[in-house]
Amino acid sequence: MPKYWVNRSLQANTSHEALVREYSLTSLDALKSTLTYTCKLNTIGDKLRSKFIKLSATNRTLEQLSCHPRHSIFACWLRTMAGIFMSNTDANAYLEMYHMHVVDRSQLAYLLGEPEARANGINEQSINSTLHSFGRAIDIGAGDGGVTLELAPLFSEIVATEASQSCVDAIARKGIEVVHTQDLNAFPSNRYDVVMCFNVLDRCSCPQDLIFDMHRLAVQETGRIILAVALPFRPYVECGPMGKKCPPEQDLKLNSRASWEEAVNEFVEKILTPNKLEVLSFSRVPYLCQGDVDSPYYVLDDAVFVLRPVI
């Protein structure tokens, strides 16, 4: 398992925790009882509290975990060997290991929908009515493209960007248009109806520049930004093989020891609001990673924000 996940995730480091995660894969109800989608609303700021949208695990969540069973000892050894010569990200994409899952298309359609459309909750069966209905999208730092592929049917057009060549190759194999770059200046302003950025902010060296680019790329006022970030915020910037880590060039100066709720309050107050990003809604979502010999899967606590860029 990549070191940054082991250090940060709620590891199944006891036999009891491992058994709980094994059990959670037996049914959707079992998975729902294990994963955390709730928060302590009384500790969320007054202005934010009413914007919390509670999600829950879906059949697609269970399917994603079941379709990617834990890696064998041999696969883990192979991954360790590859990590001697390339970064964690490149090694995972090259070997097609440690697939990630954040939200599925029914959950994202629910978050992007109008408030009145959310009255009856998520309806996985009615997802066809929302296909291609959310316009043009860009997925920044798309990883191996698994999340992009899951969400692509919601949009009339989608393009992914990636800095890792191994990830670019993996995305291209999935039939998704992809641009190999970490410089977003070549992309025109006010172009995308939806700008997506899933768990990239803590992995890039210049997160402030990335936030600026997301604001610039989205259609002003009517565009939406979907930003997922693991909280509390703990940067992990790769800079070579053997899991080598570098300090980010831009430090957001966020409290890495805060609770999830405290981290949400701080992130909105210090990062989103000053950068003219209005929070329309936010959710707590488990950021899931395919497991290995130590655990059936790994999980971090994500905040998924639906944002509106304001002038």
Image (spheres, helix red, strand yellow):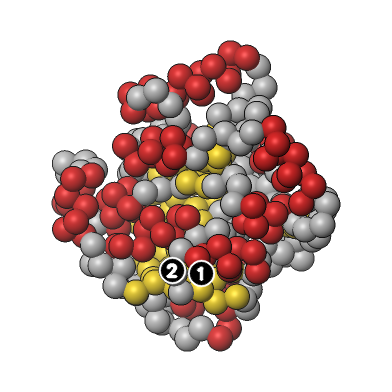
Quadrant in the picture for residue 135: bottom left
Q: Furthest-front residue in view?
A: 74
| As drawn, 121 above or below 40 | below
Can see residue 36?
yes
Find residue 140 and report its horizontal and vertical position in percent: 52, 67
Residue carrying label 2? 175
Image side of residue 281 versus residue 243, left or right: left
Q: Say what amino acid the circle numbered 1 marks.
A: Ala
Using the image as rendered, state which of residue 175 and residue 16 is in the foreground: 175
Residue 94 appears left or right of 68: right
Q: In the figure, 52 relative to 191: above or below? A: above
Left or right, 207 with reference to 226: right
Q: Amino acid at mark 2?
A: Gly
Going 77% across and 58% down the picture, which residue do you hit?
A: 86
Q: Position of residue 52 (x, y in %)?
A: 36, 43
Q: Position of residue 270 (x, y in %)?
A: 58, 56
Residue linked to disc 1:
172
Residue 214 in view of the camera: no
Q: Considering the image in quadrants, where does the N terminus appear?
A: top right
**Which percent across, then down, holds residue 124?**
23, 44
State if disc 1 and disc 2 touch (CB < 8 Å): yes
Dot 1 crowding, Cα within 10 Å, few <14, some 14–19, many 20+: some
Q: Residue visible at 40% across and 44% down?
A: 283
Q: Residue at position x 51%, y 23% from top?
A: 21
CA distance separating discs 2 and 1: 5 Å
Would residue 121 be found to the left or right of residue 149 on screen? left
| Camera-nearest residue between 246 and 266 | 246
Q: Residues within 10 Å of mark 2 (few under 14, many from 20)?
A: few
